[in-house]
Image: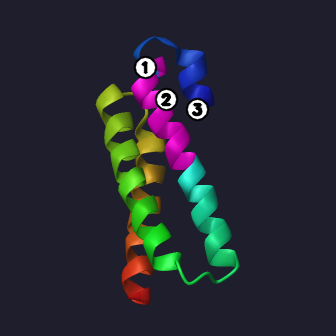
Amino acid sequence: MNHCLEAGGEKMDPAHFRLMTDCAEVCQSTANFLLRNSNFNDQFCLDCATLCDYCAQSCKELGDMSDCAEACRECADSCHQMAFAMI
């Protein structure tokens, strides 16, 4: 998010910035659920994967955000794997 704040312009598009914030929030919540071995881990992992996929795509479309897009894609892949391992 700091990169977007400093770059400004289209990277500060409200929809993109909300998506990044939502992604960060669901990642933190999912980590918390996993830490306490919740019965809802699989659902949170699926939701996290979905938001990370959307965030990766949004970052990719804006350009100059390949590191962010890759981090989001890796998180999405990891969450997909965990969710399906739990089902």
Badge 2: how crowded within 10 Å, few (<14), some, or many (20+)? some
Q: Is residue 20 within the magenta segment?
A: yes
Asked whether the residues under the numbered discs 1 and 3 touch, taking CB atoms below 8 Å apart as contact, a structural biologist would say no
Identify residue for label 2. 17
Residue designated by label 1: 13
Q: Position of residue 26 (x, y in %)?
A: 54, 55
The residue positioned 42% from the left and 62% from the top of the image is 47
Return the disc, 2 or 3, that comes first in the chain's sequence: 3
Given the image, on which type of amino acid does mark 1 rest?
Asp
Q: Are marks 2 and 3 in contact (CB under 8 Å)?
A: yes
Q: CA distance from mark 2 to mark 3?
A: 7 Å
Q: CA distance from mark 1 to mark 3?
A: 12 Å
**Residue 47 appears left or right of 29:** left
Tell me where residue 87 sits by quadrant: bottom left
Mark 2 lies on a secondary structure that is: helix
Q: Position of residue 30 (x, y in %)?
A: 57, 65
x then y, percent, for residue 12: 48, 19
The residue sitting at 60% across, 17% down in the picture is 6
Which residue has dot 3 on it?
A: 1
Q: Is residue 26 left or right of residue 70?
A: right
Q: Is the magenta region chiefly helix, strand or loop?
A: helix
Q: Mark 3 is on which residue type?
A: Met
Give the residues in magenta: 12-24
